Image (cartoon, rainbow, N blue to C red):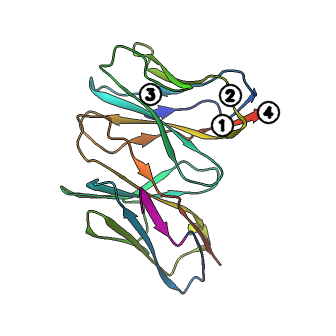
Amino acid sequence: AQKITQTQPGMFVQEKEAVTLDCTYDTSDQSYGLFWYKQPSSGEMIFLIYQGSYDEQNATEGRYSLNFQKARKSANLVISASQLGDSAMYFCAMREGGSYIPTFGRGTSLIVHP
Amino acid sequence: ETGVTQTPRHLVMGMTNKKSLKCEQHLGHNAMYWYKQSAKKPLELMFVYSLEERVENNSVPSRFSPECPNSSHLFLHLHTLQPEDSALYLCASSHSGTGESYEQYFGPGTRLTVT
């Protein structure tokens, strides 16, 4: 079974609207961490946000927030007030308790329309 | 220099050439990674070096050879590559503990074309 599943290969959003990118994960560990990265067309992966499995509050970083639903094993990324510069690939990743090495999903392509 | 740097940014090589990719991190991290990213394929972890261990993906062909002389530098030596090895090669670094977020920081990548 895949550890990280991103079911949306491509998403489109209008500028200034909010968008949710889906991520579900599979682990039997109690301690784990979830990450989101952005990869613009230039290629460099950029860390956006982190959620620890014991964190009770959803993580937020500026316009990014992580909608963490532990029982459903989902960690969706919400981008508020989309900007043209948000157009990129977005990757969800998980680090399980016993390892520092993350597992990545296949990514979701986001295109922001003006 | 700050963050993670990679050289060269672009590389075109023939199947009989030998070349090396270089990665350097200035973040005080103790783990470094090589990833391969091909079009329409998942990100593939190739090698990891940390203070404690070297981890390698057993599916990586022996024509890729990593070298990590210290915690700040990582190389990927390439020889007798195949056209299917054309891809974006990303280097990353992080702390190697498991108690904190320890996110990865990536370099800009080397776009490799094998002719």
Pointer 3 with pointer 4, Cβ within 8 A: no
Q: Amino acid at mark 4?
A: His
The residue at 27%/41% (across/down) is: A99
**Lateral position of residue A8 relative to residue B106, left or right:** right
Q: Give the number of the disc on residue A82.
A: 2
Residue A78's place in the image compared with B73, above or below, is above
Q: Is residue A72 magenta?
A: no
The residue at 53%/58% (across/down) is: B108
- Mark 3 / mark 2, whichever is N-terminal: 3
Q: Chain of mark 2?
A: A
Q: Quadrant of the N terminus of chain B?
A: bottom left
Q: Which residues are magenta?
A: B1-8
Label 2: how many Cα within 10 Å (few below 14, some 14–19, many 20+): many
Task: Identify residue for label 1.
Answer: A86
Q: Give the number of the disc on residue A113.
A: 4
- Mark 1 / mark 4, whichever is N-terminal: 1
Label 3 – label 2 distance at C-alpha: 25 Å
Q: Is residue A89 visible?
A: yes
Residue B108's place in the image compared with A70, above or below, is below
Label 2 – label 1 distance at C-alpha: 6 Å
Q: Give the number of the disc on residue A10.
A: none
Pointer 3 with pointer 2, Cβ within 8 A: no
Residue B73's place in the image compared with B91, above or below, is below
